[in-house]
Image (cartoon, rainbow, N blue to C red):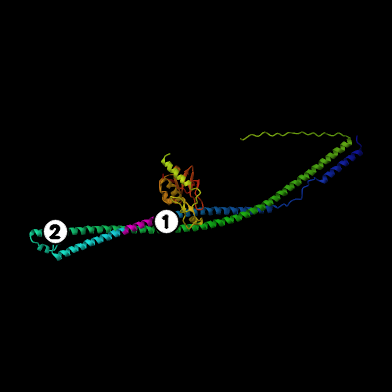
Amino acid sequence: MMSARSLVVALSAGLAVALSVSTAGPAGAVPPPPPNPSDSEIEAGHAETRAKAGRVGELTQRLVEAEGRLQRLVDDVAWKLEQANKALVDLAAAEASAAAAQRDARAARAEADAADRSVEDVRRRADAFVAGSYQQGSTIGSISAYLGSASPEDLLARAQLLNAVSGSQLDAIDQMERARVDRANKDAAARGALDQARARQSAAEDARRAAEAAKAAAVRAMADQRQQAQRIEADRAEVERQLTEAQAGVAGLEDQRKRYEEWREAKRREEEAARRAAQEAARRAAEEAARRAAATAARRPAAGAATKATKAPGRDEGAGDTEAAVEAVVARALSQVGVPYSWGGGNADGPTLGIRDGGEADLHGDYGKVGFDCSGLMVYAFAAAGVQLPRFSGYQYSAGERVPLADAARGDMLFWGPGGGQHVALYLGDGMMVEAPYSGGHVQVSSVRHHGIQPYAVRVL
């Protein structure tokens, strides 16, 4: 048995060891606490973020609406451009008709004048006949011709001759008079046709001016809407920047709060570890004191068990002339993929220089580009099959058999806008088409767009 003195010594040593462990602390002590933002600061940051996000949402909605209006205006400009193109085509046709009517009127006038001269010539010769008969008293036709006859037979012969000559002259005058009246009627008809042609030309010119004015107004409206959309986009970009800053500020405050919470948890674990270490040191010190006091030198062996990890093996993952014409048309259209869009460009022989439109096409310099617009590409493609299409897409919509859109086949034309006057493309099948889409673009193969598409395709071949 251990003496009382030995027990006191052992307990004193154990307490000293425990005290030294509890006061020294762990080697990796927790650093001083980081900043801890208040709840009001974090809530203020969140409130600012919500306000900025709401403003971004509002501006986004306004931008969507503005872009929707812009797209409608772009479509309207495209329609007005095609109407202006139609007016140019109609004006050219009216001018050609007026020129032809002018030529017909000149020819009819010339014929009428010639008929008048012929009648006057016959009339003069008839007058000369009458005058000669009166002066000469011969068989030409005066009373002296009867009085100067030598016998009744001579008198009868002279009368017969006089009647024949007079009848011939009168018949000639009658025929020439009828010819003159006929020529005069033709002249009047030609002049009437000329007046109608000029009226059509004047109406076409008025329509062209109206179409140009409508186009210019649409272009101005589109430009104004584009500027408004750009201003909204700029405002949204600025608010998005502010939102990003606000989010970063809140994130910074929350990160500080997170780091503080992590520090506080680390501090709690440190203190808990120190407390447990002190308890364990005290326990071990007491056990050591008791062991020494009991003079037990036995030690408990340490044993360990090793485990071997294994990894499961992996696995190895292991038709006829029409068809020929259709293909010729399709091949000709596809041969132009990549060619620039050019408003007013393209004919049966290939791409041509575009023309000015006073709007979107001019902004993209189409008048200086050699290429196709949508209807020009169709004119060029179908020329491969010997088909001569009109230049305006609205007229092309009436150039063949209309079939329901669901029955569209390769080589049919697809149309957009009222009366097909906004856009036209060539259907390739399987929901694909080839088109000259818009200024700034190029001839391309794309998926069929069903927004605004006409319910019928047009089959020419």
Quadrant showing the N terminus = top right
Q: Which residue is mark 2?
A: 161
Along the line of sight, the residue nearer the viewer: 148 or 130: 148
**Residue 155 position within the rendered picture, expressed as x and y whole percent measured from the top left:** 10, 60
Q: Residue at x 42, y 58 (%)?
A: 208
Crowd band around label 1 with a 10 angstrom C-alpha radius: few (<14), some (14–19), many (20+): many
Start and end of the magenta stretch? Answer: 91-106
Secondary structure of the residue carrying numbered label 2: helix
324 vs 20, nearest the viewer: 324
Mark in front: 2 vs 1: 2
Relative side of 126 to 448, left or right: left
The one of 297 and 176 positioned closer to us in this rendering? 176
Residue at the disc numbered 1: 88
The three-letter code of the residue at mark 2 reads Leu
Question: Looking at the image, is mark 2 or mark 1 earlier in the sequence?
Answer: 1
- Depicted 408 relative to depicted 169: above or below: above
The residue at the point 19 percent across, 59 percent down is 169
